[in-house]
Image (cartoon, grey):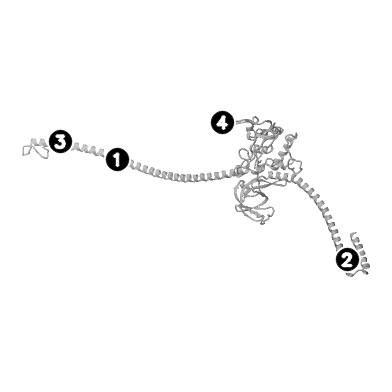
Amino acid sequence: MQYAIVGILVIAFIAFLVLSAKAWHWSNIVFLSLTFLAGLGALIGMSQVLDARRTEMLAAKRTSEALAQMEKQIETALNGSGLAYEYAPESLRGLSETLDLETAGRGRVWRSGEIEIKDKNRVFKFSGDRIFSQDNPANMQDMLMFVYADRVFEEVVYPVLFVGTMRVIGETPNSLELEPVFIANAEEFDAPSQTWTLFEKSPADQRDAYIRNTEIKLDEDDPNLNQQLTEYRKILVEQFMPATVFNLDLNDPDQARAYENMVDRVMFDGLPLVKIENWIESQTDRVSQRFDPSNEEIFVRYQFQEKSNLTYQVDSTGSIETDGQFNRGGQAVDPALHAGGEIEFQKGDEILVDQLTADGYQRGDEPVAPFPTQEPVTEVTRVYVRQLSDFPFLLKTLQRRTAEYTAEIARIAENNRRSQLADADAQEQINLRVDVIERLTSDQSKLQADLDTVRQFADDVKMKKNELESSITRTSGEIREQHRKIKAMVRSISESSTGNVSRSNPILGE
């Protein structure tokens, strides 16, 4: 339309110039033509600008409306409804909050890697390629990994079997070479049965680790709780905690009882003792008809009738590596679990208090009063709360004790070696002594034989001596007798002789 109007104006202007050429000077005509063309160009430009402005204003209005709508959608996606007092579970912040609670202290995870044996080390192959860049160097050299072996339940892969801790000593874009540091399951390490999963930090024990992967919701007020418990137990036994994973023989009564108690501890976690007893009474195929948790695992649920009289400090400082996520007083060491200040309770709040604190106890010389005497509360029920295992702390303790036992074993082995050397030396001395005794015994036997010979010779000599003495005595007697006879004969001869025989004869002794 606007081009038609411009065309009519141009035709009229040309006609006007033709008619005025008879009376005007050509310079006036040229000047008027130029002025007309300039005005026409300006008019066309202004119309285009106005049209563009109108188009942009309409577009800006539509964009503003879309922006406002998008901002509202973004706000809803981020935080949920603006009227809600907390982040909606399906909102980004709600999901992030759930994810933060789920992965608190866990670190990064590398799942389902194929394993190859390389001498004393193991090679972990990533299920997908890693991206190396200046912004993402992905340097994992010397990182300590917590290694779990995977198992498949209903076509879903779960890391369920702790193999041990290993250190990264080499890496490529597709694999890691792992050096064993502490091996908890030598059989799986020596012969990997399936894929492995690597954790940057040791996974934490969680109460809902199993039930959240099912469609079962255990509600203690639900009249069908017993049926839900039966279904939940079936899933635990068949999928998550089969006896074969723990290498237990259910035909052995002791192992069957231990396995049943293991499943009970997971299954009954968070349920009132009364509900647990009701379910056990309804079962006919149990090994044990009782469930006896320790006193440390029995908690009393209280409801505040008024605002609490005291405030409670639930945050603590320390090291997760040495203290775990919680210290002995139950205060949170992990910064991700800190409340940010002291806690106080309002009317209608419900809390769980351990049975020892609930009933009171003696702390040294100072008695600690029962909890209901300190706070305006009434008891609702008593609940079984499974004590969670602090895996990093237990692993640290196990490694420390393993090192201590290894050193003790080495010391005992050295003592055994020394004892064996002493025993060998003693045995050698015994053998030497036996040899000496044998030789002494042989010498004694020979000496005894010589002694017998000497005694026999002495007896013979003595007998010969006696014979000689007897012979000498007899001979002496005979000689004396002969002497006497000779003497008498001589005397007789002397007396009877008349010759010059002297009375004193030296031969006769006179």
| Cα–Cα gap, marks 3 and 4 | 126 Å
Question: Mark 1 — residue?
Answer: 458
| Structural distance between the alpha carbons of marks 2 and 1 | 184 Å
Q: Which comes before the other along the chain, label 3 or label 4? A: 4
Q: Nearer the viewer, mark 2 or mark 1?
A: 2
- Report how far apart the C-alphas of labels 4 and 1 lie in the structure: 94 Å
Tell me where residue 73 appears, x and y as whole percent: 78, 47
Q: Name the residue under label 3.
A: 484
Q: The disc labelled 1 sits on which kind of residue?
A: Ala
Q: What kind of residue is marked 4?
A: Asp
Asked if the residues shown at circle 2 and circle 1 are in contact, with their CB atoms under 8 angstroms apart, the answer is no
Q: In which quarter of the image is residue 437?
A: top left
| Among numbered discs 2 and 1, the one appearing first in the sequence | 2
Circle 2 packing at 10 Å, graded few (<14), some (14-19), many (20+), is some
Q: In which quarter of the image is the C terminus?
A: top left
The quarter of the picture where residue 455 lies is top left
